Amino acid sequence: MRYRTVIACLLLAIVSACASPTSRFYTLSGPSPTGGKASGPSVAVGPVALPTVVDRPQIVVHAGANEVRLDEFNRWASPLPEDITRVIAANLAQELATERVWPYGQSTQTTTDYQVRIDIQKFESTLGDAVVIEAIWTVRRVADDTSRSGRSLVRETTAGGDFDALVAAHSRALARVSGEIAVAIQTP
């Protein structure tokens, strides 16, 4: 009897040691649609380019000056460039008070007033500290093919040490980048 109890305990220990943690999936957040004007400027957002190191399903966090860690159990729910595009489009719709903003390539409209291209140079995440987004963007007015470019460098502190706080900080940082892009669209 004692022998069977020991074997059962060993098997239970082996099975519980093999159980892997549950994966968690995250999305960036933007404002909810507010019913902007149907007559405002039409804006296509994208494409968005990202550094290869962060363009992956795993959330990449900085672990030191020259070290990053790919977290296998904390992941993006959709491809990060698509999520960034969606959030910037929602932010611009709110900033410009128009419902005519959408991700590039996801509309049935063949022409737009503006196209916004974004090249994310930095998308850094440090748990319990801050996120940094550096973006070079171009706003092209389609009618006369003129462009205005800018560079946004945003640092947003996290409100906690977990991944929820990290993703929320990225969402706030993207809202600030979107604000700068909106000013470029509104400036004659």
Image (cartoon, helix red, strand yellow):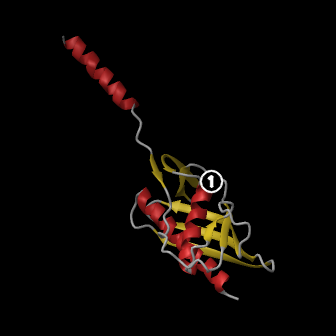
Helix, strand or loop for disc 1? loop
Q: Can the viewer see residue 11? A: yes
Residue 185 place in picture, x, y as percent: 66, 81
Q: Is residue 129 left or right of residue 114?
A: left
Q: Is residue 56 left or right of residue 15?
A: right
- Most extreme residue toward the left is 1
Can you say whether 3 is above or below 170 in the image? Answer: above
Q: Amino acid at mark 1?
A: Asp
Question: Which residue corresponds to the image point at 49% horizontal and 57% vertical from the top-left?
Answer: 27
Can you say whether 104 is above or below 55 in the image? Answer: below
Residue on which disc 1 sits: 55
Can you say whether 18 is above or below 118 in the image? Answer: above
Neighbours of disc 1 within 10 Å: few (<14), some (14-19), many (20+): some
Q: Is residue 44 left or right of residue 129?
A: right
Residue 138 place in picture, x, y as percent: 72, 74
Q: Is residue 71 left or right of residue 17?
A: right
Question: Which residue corresponds to the image point at 37% horizontal and 31% vertical from the top-left?
Answer: 17
Q: Can the viewer see residue 138? A: no
Quadrant of the image occupied by residue 177: bottom right
Residue 48 place in picture, x, y as percent: 67, 62
Question: Which residue corresponds to the image point at 40% horizontal and 40% vertical from the top-left?
Answer: 21
The answer to which of 183 and 162 lies nearer the viewer is: 183
Residue 106 place in picture, x, y as percent: 65, 60
